[in-house]
Image (cartoon, helix red, strand yellow):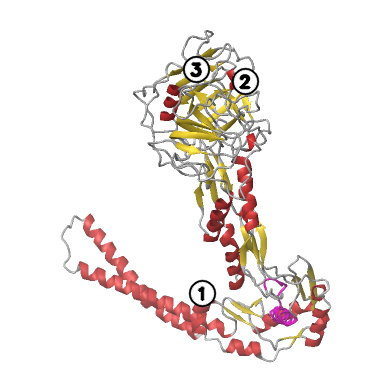
Amino acid sequence: MRGDAVLEQAGPSWNGPYMEKESMQSQMNDGKDAGENKKSPGKGKKVAITTAAVACGLAVAAGGAYTYLSGQYKSVFFPNTVINGLDASGKTVAQVKEMIDSSMVAYTLELEGRDGGKEEINGGQIGLHPEYDGSLENLLASQEPMRWGLHFIEGASHTIETMVVYDRDKLQDAIDGLDCMDRDKAQPPADAYLSEYQPGQGFVVMPEQPGTVVDPEKMMEAVSDAILNLQDGISLAEKDVYEKAKITSKDPKLQEEAKRWNYYTDVTVKYHFGDQEEVLDGDTTHTWVKEDGEGNLVLDEEKVAEYVAKLAETYDTASKPKNFKTSYGDMVTINKGTYGWRINQSAEAAALSEIIRSGVSQEREPVYSQTAASRGETDYGDTYVEINLTAQHLYFYVNGALVVESDFVSGNEARGFTTPAGVYPLTYKQRNAVLRGPGYASPVSFWMPFNGGIGLHDASWRGAFGGRIYKTNGSHGCINLPRSAAQSIFESISAGDPVLCYRLDGTDNGKTSAPKSNAPAAVPAAAPPAPAPVQPEPTIAANPEGEGAPAETPVGETPAEGGENTQPAIPGEGSGSTENPGPAYSVTEPPQTDGPANMVPETPAPAPEAQEPAPEAQPEPQEPAPEVQPEPQEPAPETAAASPENHGGDAQVSLEGPGEGAGQ
């Protein structure tokens, strides 16, 4: 060949420089062996020439080789050439035709469905056969042999439709006969949708489901393409031949709907009840949100109120039994009384609704209508008045330290005025009040009501306290105290402090004691200054614990205001008693304190709202009538309410029915 001749002529020229280089190297070695160490002036120039000659020779050789190889691609296809799915690299037209003929003899196309099922279409069903119209020859002729190197790297794929021939109608019949084309057996696609509330997740957009219903047009296109390329099989899912859902998970309206519902359920409210917590989140509140008739989301206020009511049922301690360890070491359970924590349910329900509507999570304590000194079972804390109605003896503790201990006289049992047991908050305290009832008026210096009209106060008209005086010559229900004991309690107690009244068998020793003195007791050195009198409520309903008690008709035992004590002595009791010659009380200097832990201010407790739980039922009619409330001692009607501004003079109180009178 001519190319071969070219290579032969180029041979000597290509080898010449190499031989020259080898000869020069031999001469240099001979010189060194002979001891000739002198450098040749033209040595560097000769090396450069030699290197250039070698490079040129290599380039010429490579170019000649590439040109030689290019010649073959006039009769064979370029490297990496694919024709109708068959590898035609380095093959002649005749060889490619043989491959096509062989492929069509037993051609079968396997179709794999989304559900994993497989079906086939074979060449015989569709009249598959080759037709050569010169397309292969034209493709080969279009090759540029000198560009074979580019195809070696990039490759090329060709589909010649006129070469692979099938009957289109038969192919359509074959496709229609496939099980995957039966719509009755297929699962239609399902649109994306907004789920019901998912615990811990909220309302979730559930993704669409593709289903297995085949689009006939897409199916025909995918199968035809596979046959033309003589492919062995295809995946229908990868060819995207299935019908799609109309609403996807990325649908803007669907995303907005999820956001709208989750706005409320994403809110978390953590309630604190001392060391206990109550967490309100979407797991509960999702049932509170509903759509109105116009498609707007609204909050079910009734369910909010129900939740707050459950909080109150769980955490309110007011009007619930309390276990109390007495100063005698015995445990008693006090079942009645209004002292304790009480959630203002209407106010808290309104606040909670606003929090949920705001979409902002928070931690909080509920709104209270009444608070207590501490949390837990002993919500009365360590500042309280302990009243043992059996022993007719009381103790007053401030921050756990005993401040006052004294005998007292409680309600007259013989006349049905028994002082009820229970735990109550001190309503308020007031100096210089006049307690009035039908036909009597009793001035007191220290008035401290805690159960309606029943309260603690000094009883200067009494000459003895404790023992069994209360059985026949007791009060109308109040706790009568020696003046010094009443004053000491008054100066250290605050509105809201608990008063615990109980009975304890085995503590009645029958002994009485005389007051130390009717003169004002000295104020303990460490006692805090007495707070200013606090405004009582304008009207106070009669204590239900005393409803039905007989009216008091004082007979010789109610002194005139400022008059002398005319109380008749009871045998074995009173100033002449010798059973207990000691004082009726003892006063201990109270510890320094910043005030009681109770959160209730020194104001009368607000009346519960209509929707709040009703206070515990008060004792039966045989209990004493309520003590009357003090009111200003001015020329006002005797039915006027007590005024807290009458600090310097006597306050007056009037009550229809039994009230606290002189000697009571």
- Identity of the residue drawn at 62% across and 54% down: 304
What is the x, y in percent for residue 574?
53, 15
State the separation of the CA atoms marked 2 and 1. Answer: 122 Å
State the separation of the CA atoms marked 1 and 3. Answer: 123 Å
Image position of 659 (left or right of 94): left
According to the picture, the residue beneath numbered tag 2 turns out to be: 472
Give residue 644's quadrant in the image. top left
According to the picture, the residue beneath numbered tag 1 turns out to be: 153
Is 100 above or below relative to 459?
below
- Identity of the residue drawn at 61% across and 49% down: 308
Give residue 49's quadrant in the image. bottom left
User: Which element carries disc 3, helix, strand or loop?
Assistant: loop
Q: Residues within 10 Å of mark 1 (few under 14, many from 20)?
A: few
Closer to the N terminus: mark 1 or mark 3?
Answer: 1
Quarter of the figure with the C terminus: top right
Q: Is residue 127 visible?
A: no
What is the x, y in percent for residue 516?
43, 16
Q: Amino acid at mark 2?
A: Thr
Give the magenta range.
216-238
Q: Amino acid at mark 1?
A: Ile
Going by the picture, which residue comes out furthest to the bottom? Answer: 133
Which of the pair 164/265 is nearer the observer? 265
Q: Which label belongs to residue 416? A: none
According to the picture, the residue beneath numbered tag 3 turns out to be: 463
Closer to the N terminus: mark 2 or mark 1?
Answer: 1
Which of the pair 598/299 is nearer the observer? 598
- Identity of the residue drawn at 21% across and 67% down: 44
